Image (cartoon, rainbow, N blue to C red):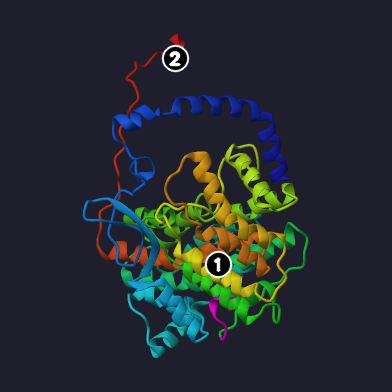
Amino acid sequence: MLKTRFEDILASNDKKIEQLSEKALASDIISNELYEKYNVFRGLRDNKGVGVITGLTEISEMNGYITNEDGIRVPIEGVMYYRGIDIFDIIKGIMKNNRFGYEECAYLLLCGSLPDRKELEEFVQLLNDFRSVPDSFVRDIILKAPSKDVMNAISRSILTLYSYDNNPDDISVKNVFRQAVQLIAVMPMLAVYSYQAYRHYILGKNLYIRQPKPELSTAENFLYMLKGTDRYTQEQAHILDICMILQAEHGGGNNSTFTTHVVTSSGTDTYSCVSASLGSLKGPRHGGANLKVVHMMDDILKHVKVLSDKNIEAYLEKILAKEAFDKSGLIYGLGHAVYSVSDPRALILRDQLVKYMSDKKKDRLYTLYDKLQYIAPEVIRKKRNVTGNIAINVDYYSGYLYRQLDIPEELYTPIFAISRILGWSAHRIEELANNGKIIRPAYIAVADRSEYIDIDER
């Protein structure tokens, strides 16, 4: 009833909204010449694409360049460190013992060092103790207002958890740490339950609400709550665990983590802060990029019947010319603001994909992924006159891996959120620990002066 009335209001005001929005757009366009005149770096990146320094962090490091003795930036194979430890060594150590590592990385990022066996067991127990939501929360909050967008549903749930916290506004490090552990523990539940609500109420499928099991890792619990017993393999759970580790953190400057720093600096509560970061991550230029890659690949398969190098190249040229796919002119899954030669996360995921598919039938999609990773950079260099390296990034493989694990597309970006809550939490605590000032960069006003005109004279 309410929705129908709102739709009627929208329909009756559509023309008026269109006219006013066009007026708003016309008044808000700022010329490129003014950005150059005032030396303003759009996107906080200079004219060489280097990020403007806005802070310091000990949580992680990633780089795709070194600066030589002449001050010239030289591209290198991408490097990535969690608390100073090479991500390749972290993944290698976890795989060596066939362990799940997400919880270990959570301890590392939050506490600053690798846990010993006793510390890890106690931390896992802490997560298990907090892995539950308040009584009737699923029924009253998640099931009663299902959303087709799981990220929005998670954000609503996070904000609502504020009301169930006896001490929500205390921003002491001890209290924020407690809140962080709770959110890390329940984020997979919020994501899966929100998807199940969407699946039941919007798609008309059966409803399954499964309680997490304490003997399972975070990755295993996610797959169990989503699929049920015996519906996933240990190999699949380990692949998901590695995906979550690689997406757990990526420096203080990525869009959602910088959002965490900005919002934390205002002194607000943890739930508002995480919700803001979720809103950032949802965007297709950030956490939603892996879904764009998957849809782009599906579009290519639909229109390119024979997957020859020549045919793929021709269709990619159409995409760049804004004549195909989403008409954005972008080939998704390529390029990165930090990495030049390679994205270490992409290399690790590619190895996981090759290993997982080694004894399985290779379909057309696998062939396309294999070919496009080499063809697309050359097409971009040719059509866009790019002389530097163009690396395949983590989004190129993550969505394809999720599809191989039979995870619904609606959960691709939420998995990113489940992972990145570790990084957000660590950076929130770091911002609070250093008693930083409120983050407030300056904007230059460029509007011309004008006189106020009486309403009868306009």
| Furthest residue in direction bottom, as rendered | 118
Q: Residues within 10 Å of mark 1 (few under 14, many from 20)?
A: some
Residue nearer the viewer, 255 or 157:
255
Q: Quadrant of the C terminus?
A: top left
Q: Is residue 53 left or right of residue 167?
A: left
The residue located at (62%, 74%) in the rendering is 356
Residues shaded magenta: 215-221
Q: Can you give x and y, in whole percent of width and height, for residue 413 in the image?
A: 56, 59
Q: In this view, does 70 lie above or below 394?
A: above
Residue nearer the viewer, 398 or 210:
398
* Residue receiving disc 1: 350
* Residue receiving disc 2: 455
Q: Is residue 310 left or right of residue 306?
A: left
Mark 2 and mark 1: Cα distance apart in space: 64 Å
Q: Which of marks 2 and 1 is nearer the N terminus?
A: 1
* Residue type at the position of mark 1: Arg
Q: Can you give x and y, in whole percent of width and height, for residue 91 in the image?
A: 46, 76
| Furthest residue in direction left, as rendered | 69
Residue nearer the viewer, 368 or 268:
368
